[in-house]
Image (cartoon, rainbow, N blue to C red):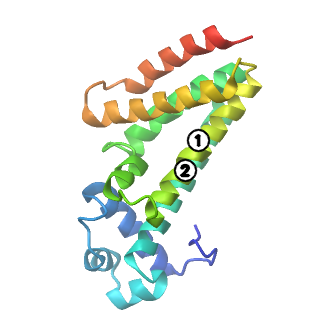
Amino acid sequence: MVTDTARPLTPAAIRILEAASRLFYAQGIRAVGVEAVATAAGVTKKTLYDRFGSKDQLVTSYLRARDQMWRNWLTAFVQEHATTPTESILITFDALDGWMRREEPRGCGFANACAEFPDPEHPARLVVLEQKQWLLDYLTKLAKAANVRHPKQVARQLVVLHDGAAAAYALGVVGDSAYEARTIAAQLLTATTR
């Protein structure tokens, strides 16, 4: 794990980031102050500011670390379980299901962060947008490999299915929302495969 400046994290910084990650996701970023993070990490506020500079930088580091965990989870899951290009796309929904059950019972951490920071120039929001763009690019790559017509358009629809499944799961509306999204994705792929 590295900060935005690509410097290795000290042991204290790792504890701070781990504590921030737990608290920010569970309680909301704006609801958690730096004092609560420092206390949970067993450090002083001075140490927190020495390691991260500001709460905004800590939030950015939290989101980047979460993004990297998601990317690693998703790509490894697809690589391990998919046997065909089309299956690779569908497997992303199985990966999403596992991720939501393990890491995101309160919904997408990136969507939650975006809701807390409406300013489009806020650094946290920029990290969220980078994460969503990465997912779109990854799904576009998978769609091209699966030889679907209009892979960029299909990838956009798949992102909507991913984010919709995460929202439905978090709200408790559809407990197996990733499975439902996977079913819709399969129909989409059947209709668009060359």
- Residue lying farthest to the front in this orientation: 120
- Closest to the observer, 9 or 155: 155
Q: Disc number at residue 104?
A: none
Q: Disc number at residue 131?
A: 2
The answer to whether residue 69 is seen in the rendering is no
Residue 105's place in the image compared with 180, above or below, is: below
Q: In the figure, residue 190 lies in which quadrant?
A: top right
Residue 55's place in the image compared with 189, above or below, is: below
Residue 90: x, y in percent?
58, 23
SS of the residue at dot 1? helix
Residue 144: x, y in percent?
74, 27
SS of the residue at dot 2? helix
Q: Report whether 65 appears left or right of 21.
A: right
Residue at horizontal 34%, vertical 42%?
107
Q: Disc number at residue 135?
A: 1
- Closest to the observer, 190 or 20: 190
Mark 2 is on which residue type?
A: Gln
